[in-house]
Amino acid sequence: MAGSLRKLFTNEEVLNAIDSSKGNYVKASEKLTKLGRGLISYQLVNYWHRQLTEVVKKNGDPYIGTTVLDRKIRKNEVKLRKPSPLDYVSKIEQSKTEDNSRILAFSCTHEPYVHPDALAFLAALEDHFNFTRVIHLGDETDGQALKFHDSDPNLDSAGHELAKARIGIEKLAKLFPVLEICHSNHGSLVYRRAKKYGIPAEMIKSYRDILFPNGGGEGWSWKNSIRLELPSGEELLLRHDKTGDILNSAAHERANEIRGHKHTTLKLDYRSSDACLYWGMYVGCMIDRKSSAFGYGDLHGNRPILGASVVINSLPIPMPMVLDKHGRWIGRLIGV
Protein backbone atom coordinates (compact mmCIF):
# COMPACT_ATOMS: atom_id res chain seq x y z
CA MET A 1 0.00 0.00 0.00
CA ALA A 2 2.81 2.39 0.94
CA GLY A 3 4.47 1.75 -2.41
CA SER A 4 1.23 2.53 -4.24
CA LEU A 5 0.82 5.80 -2.32
CA ARG A 6 4.40 6.80 -3.09
CA LYS A 7 3.73 6.60 -6.82
CA LEU A 8 1.04 9.30 -6.42
CA PHE A 9 3.56 11.97 -5.39
CA THR A 10 6.63 13.30 -7.17
CA ASN A 11 9.96 13.68 -5.38
CA GLU A 12 9.57 17.45 -5.65
CA GLU A 13 6.16 17.40 -3.95
CA VAL A 14 7.46 15.36 -1.02
CA LEU A 15 10.58 17.50 -0.58
CA ASN A 16 8.66 20.76 -0.94
CA ALA A 17 6.19 19.66 1.73
CA ILE A 18 9.06 18.83 4.09
CA ASP A 19 11.02 22.02 3.33
CA SER A 20 8.01 24.31 3.70
CA SER A 21 7.22 22.60 7.02
CA LYS A 22 10.81 23.15 8.17
CA GLY A 23 11.34 19.44 8.64
CA ASN A 24 8.19 18.89 10.67
CA TYR A 25 6.91 15.56 9.36
CA VAL A 26 3.46 16.00 10.95
CA LYS A 27 2.86 19.26 9.09
CA ALA A 28 4.40 17.82 5.93
CA SER A 29 2.04 14.83 6.12
CA GLU A 30 -0.93 17.18 6.46
CA LYS A 31 0.14 19.14 3.38
CA LEU A 32 0.54 16.00 1.30
CA THR A 33 -2.84 14.68 2.51
CA LYS A 34 -4.49 17.95 1.42
CA LEU A 35 -3.44 17.21 -2.14
CA GLY A 36 -6.28 14.70 -2.10
CA ARG A 37 -4.45 11.57 -3.17
CA GLY A 38 -4.64 9.62 0.07
CA LEU A 39 -4.10 9.79 3.82
CA ILE A 40 -0.38 10.24 4.50
CA SER A 41 1.03 9.62 7.99
CA TYR A 42 4.03 11.48 9.40
CA GLN A 43 5.85 8.14 9.75
CA LEU A 44 5.43 7.60 6.01
CA VAL A 45 6.80 11.06 5.25
CA ASN A 46 9.79 10.33 7.45
CA TYR A 47 10.41 7.08 5.56
CA TRP A 48 10.10 8.77 2.18
CA HIS A 49 12.46 11.51 3.26
CA ARG A 50 15.11 8.99 4.27
CA GLN A 51 14.71 7.32 0.90
CA LEU A 52 15.17 10.59 -0.96
CA THR A 53 18.06 12.04 1.02
CA GLU A 54 21.58 11.15 1.95
CA VAL A 55 22.97 12.80 5.05
CA VAL A 56 26.66 13.52 4.67
CA LYS A 57 28.49 13.76 7.97
CA LYS A 58 31.99 14.53 6.78
CA ASN A 59 33.89 17.32 5.07
CA GLY A 60 31.32 19.90 6.12
CA ASP A 61 29.18 19.19 3.04
CA PRO A 62 26.94 22.27 2.64
CA TYR A 63 24.25 20.24 0.87
CA ILE A 64 23.18 18.03 3.80
CA GLY A 65 19.49 17.24 3.61
CA THR A 66 19.16 17.55 -0.15
CA THR A 67 18.86 14.71 -2.63
CA VAL A 68 21.97 13.17 -4.11
CA LEU A 69 20.97 14.38 -7.57
CA ASP A 70 20.40 17.95 -6.30
CA ARG A 71 23.86 18.00 -4.75
CA LYS A 72 25.49 16.73 -7.92
CA ILE A 73 23.71 19.35 -10.01
CA ARG A 74 24.79 22.13 -7.65
CA LYS A 75 28.35 20.88 -7.81
CA ASN A 76 28.12 20.71 -11.61
CA GLU A 77 28.78 16.96 -11.51
CA VAL A 78 25.71 16.36 -13.65
CA LYS A 79 25.53 18.15 -16.99
CA LEU A 80 22.89 17.99 -19.65
CA ARG A 81 24.06 16.67 -22.99
CA LYS A 82 24.06 19.27 -25.73
CA PRO A 83 22.67 17.77 -28.95
CA SER A 84 25.02 18.27 -31.86
CA PRO A 85 25.15 17.31 -35.53
CA LEU A 86 28.39 15.55 -34.58
CA ASP A 87 26.28 12.97 -32.73
CA TYR A 88 25.51 11.44 -36.11
CA VAL A 89 28.95 11.71 -37.73
CA SER A 90 31.44 8.84 -37.96
CA LYS A 91 34.18 9.13 -35.36
CA ILE A 92 36.63 7.32 -37.63
CA GLU A 93 38.49 9.45 -40.14
CA GLN A 94 37.50 8.37 -43.62
CA SER A 95 39.59 8.44 -46.77
CA LYS A 96 39.09 11.65 -48.73
CA THR A 97 39.00 9.58 -51.91
CA GLU A 98 35.43 8.36 -52.39
CA ASP A 99 35.15 4.93 -54.01
CA ASN A 100 31.64 4.20 -55.26
CA SER A 101 32.56 1.30 -57.51
CA ARG A 102 30.93 -1.41 -55.37
CA ILE A 103 27.98 -0.30 -53.25
CA LEU A 104 25.75 -2.39 -50.99
CA ALA A 105 22.35 -0.98 -50.02
CA PHE A 106 19.98 -2.75 -47.66
CA SER A 107 17.17 -1.70 -45.32
CA CYS A 108 14.72 -2.57 -42.57
CA THR A 109 16.60 -4.96 -40.30
CA HIS A 110 14.15 -3.97 -37.55
CA GLU A 111 16.31 -5.41 -34.78
CA PRO A 112 15.55 -7.51 -32.80
CA TYR A 113 12.94 -8.83 -35.24
CA VAL A 114 15.49 -9.44 -38.00
CA HIS A 115 15.54 -12.63 -40.05
CA PRO A 116 17.86 -15.20 -38.40
CA ASP A 117 19.87 -15.59 -41.63
CA ALA A 118 20.08 -11.91 -42.57
CA LEU A 119 23.60 -11.42 -41.25
CA ALA A 120 24.86 -14.54 -43.03
CA PHE A 121 23.29 -13.32 -46.28
CA LEU A 122 24.91 -9.89 -45.95
CA ALA A 123 28.24 -11.52 -45.09
CA ALA A 124 28.00 -13.65 -48.25
CA LEU A 125 27.40 -10.53 -50.32
CA GLU A 126 30.39 -8.84 -48.70
CA ASP A 127 32.61 -11.86 -49.33
CA HIS A 128 31.61 -11.98 -53.00
CA PHE A 129 31.72 -8.28 -53.89
CA ASN A 130 34.12 -6.76 -51.31
CA PHE A 131 32.12 -3.53 -51.13
CA THR A 132 33.76 -0.13 -51.13
CA ARG A 133 30.68 1.49 -49.58
CA VAL A 134 27.89 0.06 -47.43
CA ILE A 135 24.63 1.92 -46.81
CA HIS A 136 21.78 0.94 -44.51
CA LEU A 137 18.63 2.71 -45.66
CA GLY A 138 17.09 2.85 -42.19
CA ASP A 139 14.79 1.11 -39.72
CA GLU A 140 17.85 -0.52 -38.22
CA THR A 141 15.84 -1.08 -35.03
CA ASP A 142 12.11 -1.62 -34.67
CA GLY A 143 11.01 0.10 -31.45
CA GLN A 144 7.76 -1.87 -31.45
CA ALA A 145 7.06 -0.89 -27.84
CA LEU A 146 7.50 2.81 -28.71
CA LYS A 147 5.25 2.93 -31.76
CA PHE A 148 2.48 5.50 -31.91
CA HIS A 149 -0.14 2.88 -32.73
CA ASP A 150 -1.04 0.08 -30.32
CA SER A 151 1.84 -2.22 -29.41
CA ASP A 152 1.56 -5.98 -29.21
CA PRO A 153 1.27 -6.85 -25.49
CA ASN A 154 2.78 -10.27 -26.17
CA LEU A 155 6.08 -8.76 -27.33
CA ASP A 156 8.89 -7.33 -25.21
CA SER A 157 8.76 -4.07 -23.32
CA ALA A 158 10.84 -1.19 -24.66
CA GLY A 159 13.78 -2.00 -22.38
CA HIS A 160 13.91 -5.71 -23.16
CA GLU A 161 13.48 -5.03 -26.86
CA LEU A 162 16.38 -2.57 -26.86
CA ALA A 163 18.61 -5.03 -25.01
CA LYS A 164 17.94 -7.69 -27.65
CA ALA A 165 18.32 -5.20 -30.50
CA ARG A 166 21.77 -4.18 -29.25
CA ILE A 167 23.00 -7.76 -29.66
CA GLY A 168 22.11 -7.74 -33.35
CA ILE A 169 23.43 -4.21 -33.84
CA GLU A 170 26.80 -5.19 -32.37
CA LYS A 171 27.02 -8.16 -34.76
CA LEU A 172 26.21 -5.89 -37.69
CA ALA A 173 28.90 -3.45 -36.54
CA LYS A 174 31.46 -6.27 -36.54
CA LEU A 175 30.53 -7.15 -40.11
CA PHE A 176 30.41 -3.52 -41.26
CA PRO A 177 32.55 -1.35 -38.94
CA VAL A 178 32.00 1.55 -41.36
CA LEU A 179 28.33 1.99 -42.17
CA GLU A 180 26.22 4.91 -43.39
CA ILE A 181 22.61 4.88 -42.22
CA CYS A 182 19.63 6.91 -43.38
CA HIS A 183 17.35 8.44 -40.78
CA SER A 184 14.02 6.61 -40.76
CA ASN A 185 10.62 6.45 -39.13
CA HIS A 186 11.57 3.59 -36.79
CA GLY A 187 15.10 4.76 -36.10
CA SER A 188 13.80 8.12 -34.88
CA LEU A 189 11.01 6.75 -32.66
CA VAL A 190 12.66 7.54 -29.34
CA TYR A 191 13.14 11.20 -30.31
CA ARG A 192 9.66 11.57 -31.78
CA ARG A 193 8.17 10.07 -28.63
CA ALA A 194 10.20 12.44 -26.48
CA LYS A 195 9.13 15.44 -28.55
CA LYS A 196 5.47 14.48 -28.27
CA TYR A 197 5.66 14.43 -24.48
CA GLY A 198 7.78 17.55 -24.14
CA ILE A 199 11.11 15.89 -23.28
CA PRO A 200 14.00 17.96 -24.70
CA ALA A 201 16.78 16.26 -26.63
CA GLU A 202 19.27 17.37 -23.97
CA MET A 203 17.75 14.80 -21.61
CA ILE A 204 18.25 11.89 -24.02
CA LYS A 205 21.42 10.05 -24.92
CA SER A 206 22.82 10.35 -28.41
CA TYR A 207 21.56 7.63 -30.74
CA ARG A 208 25.03 6.06 -30.92
CA ASP A 209 25.15 5.81 -27.12
CA ILE A 210 21.68 4.25 -27.06
CA LEU A 211 22.74 1.51 -29.47
CA PHE A 212 26.29 1.11 -28.12
CA PRO A 213 26.16 1.82 -24.37
CA ASN A 214 29.56 0.22 -23.80
CA GLY A 215 31.25 1.86 -26.76
CA GLY A 216 31.31 0.85 -30.40
CA GLY A 217 29.82 2.00 -33.66
CA GLU A 218 32.51 4.65 -34.06
CA GLY A 219 32.48 4.12 -37.82
CA TRP A 220 28.71 4.49 -38.15
CA SER A 221 27.09 7.71 -39.33
CA TRP A 222 23.49 8.81 -39.81
CA LYS A 223 22.20 11.12 -42.54
CA ASN A 224 18.82 12.20 -43.88
CA SER A 225 19.81 10.97 -47.33
CA ILE A 226 22.99 10.14 -49.23
CA ARG A 227 23.87 11.56 -52.63
CA LEU A 228 26.94 10.33 -54.45
CA GLU A 229 28.51 10.13 -57.90
CA LEU A 230 28.85 6.79 -59.64
CA PRO A 231 31.91 5.88 -61.77
CA SER A 232 29.74 6.50 -64.86
CA GLY A 233 29.34 10.13 -63.81
CA GLU A 234 25.65 9.62 -62.94
CA GLU A 235 24.26 10.80 -59.62
CA LEU A 236 22.72 8.34 -57.14
CA LEU A 237 20.37 9.33 -54.31
CA LEU A 238 19.70 6.92 -51.44
CA ARG A 239 17.11 7.44 -48.72
CA HIS A 240 14.70 5.57 -46.51
CA ASP A 241 11.44 6.71 -48.04
CA LYS A 242 9.64 9.46 -49.85
CA THR A 243 6.05 9.60 -51.00
CA GLY A 244 5.36 9.41 -54.70
CA ASP A 245 6.64 7.45 -57.66
CA ILE A 246 10.33 6.65 -57.42
CA LEU A 247 11.01 7.30 -61.13
CA ASN A 248 9.22 10.65 -61.03
CA SER A 249 11.39 11.49 -58.04
CA ALA A 250 14.51 10.37 -59.89
CA ALA A 251 13.60 12.63 -62.81
CA HIS A 252 12.97 15.53 -60.45
CA GLU A 253 16.23 14.98 -58.56
CA ARG A 254 18.16 14.34 -61.79
CA ALA A 255 19.63 11.28 -60.13
CA ASN A 256 19.04 7.55 -60.01
CA GLU A 257 17.39 6.59 -56.75
CA ILE A 258 17.41 3.75 -54.21
CA ARG A 259 14.84 3.49 -51.43
CA GLY A 260 14.05 1.26 -48.47
CA HIS A 261 10.94 1.22 -46.27
CA LYS A 262 8.72 -0.92 -48.53
CA HIS A 263 9.03 -4.45 -47.18
CA THR A 264 7.09 -5.95 -50.07
CA THR A 265 9.11 -4.38 -52.87
CA LEU A 266 12.44 -5.50 -54.31
CA LYS A 267 12.69 -4.30 -57.88
CA LEU A 268 14.53 -2.23 -60.45
CA ASP A 269 12.71 0.00 -62.94
CA TYR A 270 14.12 2.08 -65.80
CA ARG A 271 12.75 5.09 -67.62
CA SER A 272 14.21 7.16 -70.40
CA SER A 273 13.80 10.62 -71.83
CA ASP A 274 15.37 12.41 -74.76
CA ALA A 275 18.09 13.49 -72.37
CA CYS A 276 18.98 10.36 -70.41
CA LEU A 277 18.24 6.89 -69.11
CA TYR A 278 17.60 6.69 -65.38
CA TRP A 279 16.49 4.08 -62.86
CA GLY A 280 14.88 3.57 -59.45
CA MET A 281 15.38 0.56 -57.17
CA TYR A 282 13.73 -0.71 -53.97
CA VAL A 283 15.82 -2.98 -51.74
CA GLY A 284 13.23 -5.11 -49.96
CA CYS A 285 13.81 -5.85 -46.27
CA MET A 286 15.62 -8.10 -43.80
CA ILE A 287 12.82 -8.90 -41.35
CA ASP A 288 11.70 -12.14 -39.79
CA ARG A 289 8.23 -12.13 -41.28
CA LYS A 290 7.14 -14.86 -38.85
CA SER A 291 7.52 -12.44 -35.93
CA SER A 292 4.28 -11.12 -34.49
CA ALA A 293 5.88 -7.65 -34.67
CA PHE A 294 4.81 -7.72 -38.33
CA GLY A 295 1.41 -9.26 -37.76
CA TYR A 296 -0.19 -6.24 -39.43
CA GLY A 297 1.17 -7.55 -42.73
CA ASP A 298 -1.15 -10.56 -42.54
CA LEU A 299 -3.96 -8.29 -43.67
CA HIS A 300 -2.15 -7.42 -46.90
CA GLY A 301 -2.04 -9.51 -50.03
CA ASN A 302 1.67 -9.00 -50.67
CA ARG A 303 4.31 -10.54 -48.41
CA PRO A 304 7.74 -9.17 -47.45
CA ILE A 305 10.56 -9.76 -49.93
CA LEU A 306 13.93 -10.30 -48.30
CA GLY A 307 17.00 -9.05 -50.06
CA ALA A 308 19.32 -6.16 -50.78
CA SER A 309 20.66 -4.23 -53.76
CA VAL A 310 24.15 -3.75 -55.10
CA VAL A 311 25.54 -1.24 -57.58
CA ILE A 312 28.65 -2.61 -59.26
CA ASN A 313 30.54 -0.22 -61.52
CA SER A 314 27.36 1.87 -61.86
CA LEU A 315 25.19 -1.18 -62.72
CA PRO A 316 22.24 -1.67 -60.31
CA ILE A 317 21.42 -5.28 -59.36
CA PRO A 318 18.59 -6.44 -57.06
CA MET A 319 19.77 -9.34 -54.86
CA PRO A 320 16.91 -11.45 -53.47
CA MET A 321 17.52 -13.53 -50.37
CA VAL A 322 15.87 -16.74 -51.53
CA LEU A 323 14.23 -18.79 -48.76
CA ASP A 324 13.38 -22.47 -48.63
CA LYS A 325 9.98 -23.89 -47.70
CA HIS A 326 10.83 -23.50 -44.02
CA GLY A 327 11.54 -19.80 -44.40
CA ARG A 328 15.30 -20.09 -44.08
CA TRP A 329 17.89 -18.76 -46.52
CA ILE A 330 19.05 -21.41 -49.00
CA GLY A 331 22.66 -20.50 -48.21
CA ARG A 332 23.84 -19.24 -51.59
CA LEU A 333 23.55 -16.13 -53.72
CA ILE A 334 21.47 -16.20 -56.87
CA GLY A 335 22.72 -14.90 -60.22
CA VAL A 336 26.34 -14.24 -59.27
Image: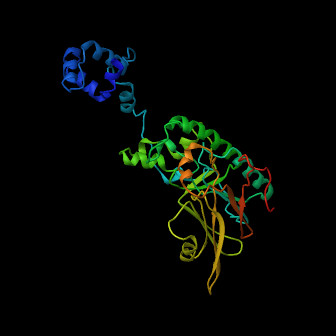
Residue 50 locus on image (x, y percent): 34, 16
Q: How many marks?
A: 0
Q: Residue at x 73, y 46 (%)?
A: 326
Q: Quadrant of residue 240?
A: bottom right
Q: Quadrant of the N terminus?
A: top left
Q: Does residue 62 appear in this view?
A: no
Q: Position of residue 39 (x, y in %)?
A: 23, 19
Residue 220: x, y in percent?
Answer: 61, 51
Q: Nearer the viewer, residue 106 or 94?
A: 106
**Residue at 71% from the left image edge and 47% from the top image edge:** 327
* Residue 18 rendering spot, x and y as whole percentages: 24, 21
Residue 35, picture quadrant: top left
216 displayed left or right of 311: left
Q: Which residue is outermost to the bottom?
A: 274
Above or below, 113 against 313 in this view is: above
Decide if residue 79 is on the left or right side of residue 321. left
Q: How is the image coloured?
A: rainbow
Residue nearest the viewer, comparing 261 with 151: 151
Pick whichever, 305 or 309, lies toward us.
305
Q: Residue at x 70, y 44 (%)?
A: 174
Q: Quadrant of the C terminus?
A: bottom right
Figure quadrant of residue 255: bottom right
Determine whether 137 is above or below 158 in the image.
below
Is residue 308 among what the camera can see?
A: yes
Residue 239 located left or right of residue 95 = left
Query: Looking at the picture, does residue 14 appear above or below residue 199?
Result: above
Q: What is the residue that sits farthest to the top in this orientation?
A: 43
